[in-house]
Amino acid sequence: MDSPPTVVTVPPKPGLPKAIGSLNVAFGFFLFLIGLGPLDLIGPSFTQNQPFKLEPGDAQNFYDQYRQRQILELQTREESTTDDAKKAALRAERLELSTSHQKNLEKHIDLKSINYVLLLLNWYYWADFATGPVLNLLMLASGIGLTQLRVWARKMAIWVALLKIGRIIALTLFFTIVIVPQAHRALQAVAPTELGKVIIAKANATLSQGRTSPPPVQYTAENFALNMVAMAYILALFGMILCLIYPAVTLVILTRPSVKAACCLDEVSGSEEREGELS
C-alpha cells in the first residue's frame, strides 16, 4: 500500500502581519492626511472640471512685477553704494532694464502649448487626487484588521499593495512619457523670450540664494529646458522607487505561508467558537 502523503505544517508567525498592520494604520492615516493637503488647491478644479490655465495677461503681469522688483532692487543698491564706478554700473543696468521692458510679451509666447502642458498636469493631479485618498483609507482599514489577524484584512492589504504599485507605475509613466516631453517643447519655446529670461533669472537667483560660492549650474536660454527635463526625470524615477518600496515589502510578507497561516488562526478559532455555541 502507498503511504499517505506527508502534510507539512507551516508554523504561523502572527508577529509579521501584526507589524504590517500597524504600519498600514500609521502610513494609511498619515498619507491620507497628506493627500488632503492640496484639497484647497486641487479640489475646486477637480469638482468643477476647471483645469489650471494661463489666462491672457497673466504672463505679462508676472513679467511686469518681476521686472519692477529687479529695478527697485538695483535702485536700492545704487543708492546704498558709495563707489562711483559701481553706482554708475548699477544705474546703467537699471536703465537698461527700464528701456528694454516689453509691453506686448504674450505676442511672443505660445499660450496654447503652455496651457496644454497645464492641462496634462491637471489630469495627472486629478488622477492622483482621486485615487490616493481612497487607497490610503483602504490601507488604514486593512491595517486595523491585520492587527487582529483577520483573513479579509490580509487579502485587502494585498490588493491595496497591488493597486498602489499599479497606480504609481501608471502615474509615473504618464508623467515621464506624456507630460515631460510636452513641457520640454514648451520650455524650449519660452526660454529665448523675455518671459523666459525672467524665469531663468528667478531660477538662478534661487540657486544662488544663501550660497557664498557660485552655484554648480547656471541656467541659460540654451540649457534651461534640458536641465528642467533632466531634473523631472530624476525626481520621477526616485519618487517611483521610494513609493514602491513599502507596497512591495507588504506583498512579499503577506504572501508568505507563515503569515497566511497566522491569519487563518482567527478563522479557525472563530469556527471553533461557533461550533461550541451550537453544541
Image: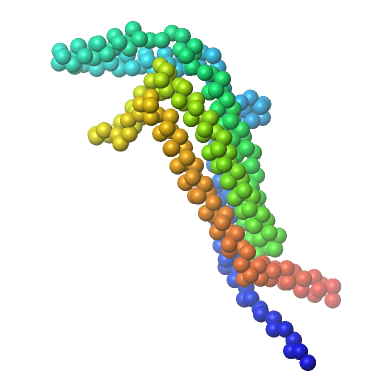
Residue 168 x/y as whole percent: 58, 46
Q: Residue at x 38, y 10 (%)?
A: 101
Q: In the orientation shown, which residue stands out farthest toward the bottom?
A: 1
Q: How is the image coloured?
A: rainbow
From this view, report whether residue 216 is shown above or below residue 51: below
Residue 84 x/y as whole percent: 15, 13
Residue 248 appears in the figure: yes
Split into 4 quadrants, where in the image is the N terminus?
bottom right
Split into 4 quadrants, where in the image is the C terminus?
bottom right
The number of discs equals 0
Q: Is residue 242 left or right of residue 131?
A: left
Judge by depth and name the residue closer to the eye, 21 or 65: 65
Q: Residue at x 55, y 17 (%)?
A: 55
Residue 140 appears in the figure: no
**Quadrant housing residue 144:** bottom right
**Quadrant housing residue 131:** top right
Residue 124 x/y as whole percent: 59, 35
Judge by depth and name the residue closer to the eye, 132 or 255: 255
Q: Is residue 106 left or right of residue 152?
A: left
Q: Residue at x 38, y 29 (%)?
A: 223
Q: Residue at x 73, y 68 (%)?
A: 267
Judge by depth and name the residue closer to the eye, 114 or 275: 114
Q: Is residue 221 left or right of residue 83?
A: right
From this view, report whether residue 118 is shown above or below residue 170: above
From this view, report whether residue 240 is shown above or below residue 81: below
Residue 29 x/y as whole percent: 58, 48
